[in-house]
Image (spheres, rainbow, N blue to C red):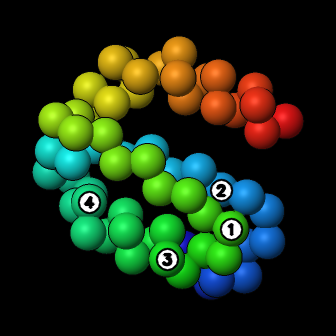
């Protein structure tokens, strides 16, 4: 990516589906562990594209709360 995720200093929310075949949940867990203020939301039975479709309102609500 051209930067070290460990140097991110702002809160980060990572939303990820457990059925994602494009980017494995294990990689999402490793990425979240490297970012100091990251929180990981693993959504059961969701894939790469279904997660934002099925959970858009929750994701947007979390963004609004973070601002």
Secondary structure under tag 1 reads: loop
Of the pair 48 and 64, the residue shown nearer to us: 64
Q: What residue is drawn where x is 37% and y is 68%?
A: 29
Badge number at residue 37: 1
Q: Are marks 3 and 4 in contact (CB under 8 Å)?
A: no
Measured in 3D between alpha carbons, the distance from the residue under mark 1 to the one under mark 4, in whole angstroms, is 18 Å
Q: Is residue 34 visible?
A: yes
Closer to us: 4 or 44? 44
Which mark, residue 25?
A: 4
CA–CA distance between discs 3 and 4? 12 Å
Please, what secondary structure does the residue beneath circle 3 have?
helix
Q: Are marks 1 and 3 in contact (CB under 8 Å)?
A: no
Residue identifier under label 3: 33
For the residue carrying disc 3, how many other residues have a C-alpha within 10 Å: few (<14), some (14-19), or many (20+)? some
Q: Tell me which numbered mark, 2 or 3, is placed earlier along the sequence.
A: 2
Across and down, in percent, residue 21 comes to 14, 51
Give the answer, above or below, for where 22 lies relative to 33: above
Q: Are marks 2 and 1 in contact (CB under 8 Å)?
A: yes
Residue that carries the numbered disc 2 in the rendered image: 12
Q: Could you tell me how far apart the alpha carbons at marks 2 and 1 are, in whole angstroms?
A: 6 Å
Label 4 residue SS: helix
Nearer to us: label 1 or label 4: 1
Residue furthest right as drawn: 67
């Amino acid at each position: 990516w051209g930067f070290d995720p460990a140097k991110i200093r702002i809160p980060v929310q990572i939303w990820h589906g457990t059925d994602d075949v494009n980017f494995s949940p294990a990689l999402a867990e490793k990425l979240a562990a490297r970012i100091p203020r990251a929180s990981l939301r693993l959504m059961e039975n969701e894939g790469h594209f279904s997660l934002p479709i099925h959970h858009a309102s929750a994701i947007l609500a979390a963004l609004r709360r973070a601002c």
